[in-house]
Amino acid sequence: MGDKRHNRVFRIPFRSGRARRDPSDAPGPEPGASAGRAPAFLERIRVSERLPSTPGFWRSPVRGVRFTAVLGLVLLVGMTLLFVTGLLSYAAYNPDLAAVNDKTPDKGLLGFYLYSWPTGPHWLYRLTQGLHVTGGIVLVPVLLAKLWSVIPKLFALPPARSVGHALERLSLLLLVGGALFEFITGLLNIQLEYVFPGSFYPLHFYGAWLFLVGFITHVALKLPRTVRVLRNREPGTERDELASPVPDAPTISRRGAFAVVGAGSLLLLVTSLGRSFDVLRPTALLTPRGVADPGPGPDGFQINRAAASVRVTPADTGEQWRLTVGGPAGERSFTREQLLAMTQYNSALPIACVEGWSTSDQWWRGVRLRDLAALAGYPDRPPGVLVESVQRSGPFRKAALRDNQVRDPRSLLALAVNGETLSLDHGYPARVIVPAAPGVLNTKWVTRLTFGEL
């Protein structure tokens, strides 16, 4: 049978990051081992502890299924809100109305939910897009904490132990990759930093649907366990595969970790929410449309694009400028003075942009779009209209508006705002203003309106 000493089972508990054993149980040096050097099998143990695929590598005592479950529940509600408001933002562009509005022409069945975007309440887009962008910013600390809490599972080996486990890992890949992609592109869009390849609209749109596949699959697989963990008030009775087997000494409790995540979200809320409210705008430190001073006077409110950025010059909007109105009655041209001689109407409407910023209601004055449609040959039931700008570059140089938007009495070809003539940056000599429409559809520096089939 040989020496019993060599038949013992060595127990090597993982404590304090080191492998320990009873010295009395130690065999002699392995063949080839040099003096002063640990045996090869101990070296292998120490190396394995430095690999992310081993449980002993992850030492934080904060990790655990309950910590992850709480964060997951917050993200379940928050991500659902972001996805729904994102779809509403896409619908607000009326992409199925005309090619000039559709930035995702190959969407196919992904556009199944599209419908005519309403004009009321007039602050609708300001609300939905404000929730979308502000909610995304506030969820950043929660998302990062959730990814940190489950990172050991991303390195777990083997990659797939069964078909169900492989499906879970695939959903996790889509979920994590999709979430990071959506958050990064969205935050870059808010900051007007377009460093990603291609247009923001299709990238963010298709990325959202890929994320949704992983999101739904992951929720279906994990929601029962999440509910069970949250209902269980007795610690230690639920298997905790996320807890470290050899945790380090705690430096913060799990409640403290929740407080840190919540404080981070609150800080981001305080420093971004103000971009949608004039009184709070100086607090919006993290957004370009926040603390930037728009200047004093009636034109002193935020803009989407300055005239110089799209190469609109005073020469384009001077004495030679004309508005061309087209339809069944033919084409007619109007000077600004002739437009001012028509019946003028007032509308109190905000400007709300896809980046999430908005203004309070501004008092616009001008000619109703439906009155211009009557001049074009539609006196009773005006159709949609194609609006064209004098700007030479940039997206939405042309934009289409639906018939319900043209018919709304608050929809104007605005010539003045807050009692003063439009400034060049605000669209002089004439701009469109429509209730509940995204800012880019409120075309500035308008030169042509074509009413009819789009």
Image (cartoon, rainbow, N blue to C red):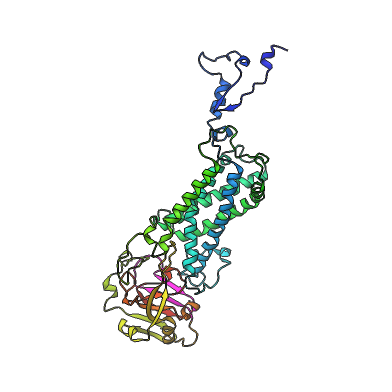
Residue 435 x, y percent position in the rendering: 46, 74
Q: In this view, does 425 lie to the left or right of 28?
A: left
Position of 55 relative to 351 (above/below): above
Residue 212 x, y percent position in the rendering: 57, 56
Asked whether the viewer can see residue 93, the reply is: no
Residue 367 x, y percent position in the rendering: 39, 82
Residue 322 position by quadrant: bottom left
Which quarter of the rendered picture does the N terminus lie within? top right
- Tell me what residue is drawn at x 62 percent, y 14 percent: 24
Inspect the magenta stretch and tell me whether residue 99 lies in it.
no
Where are the magenta residues, as a range? 383-403
Position of 307 relative to 184 (above/below): below
Q: In this view, does 79 lie to the left or right of 235?
A: left
Residue 26 position by quadrant: top right
Residue 194 position by quadrant: bottom left
Task: Tally the marks.
Answer: 0
- Tell me what residue is drawn at x 46 percent, y 69 percent: 101
Q: In this view, does 427 lie to the left or right of 126?
A: left
Asked whether the viewer can see residue 412, the reply is: yes
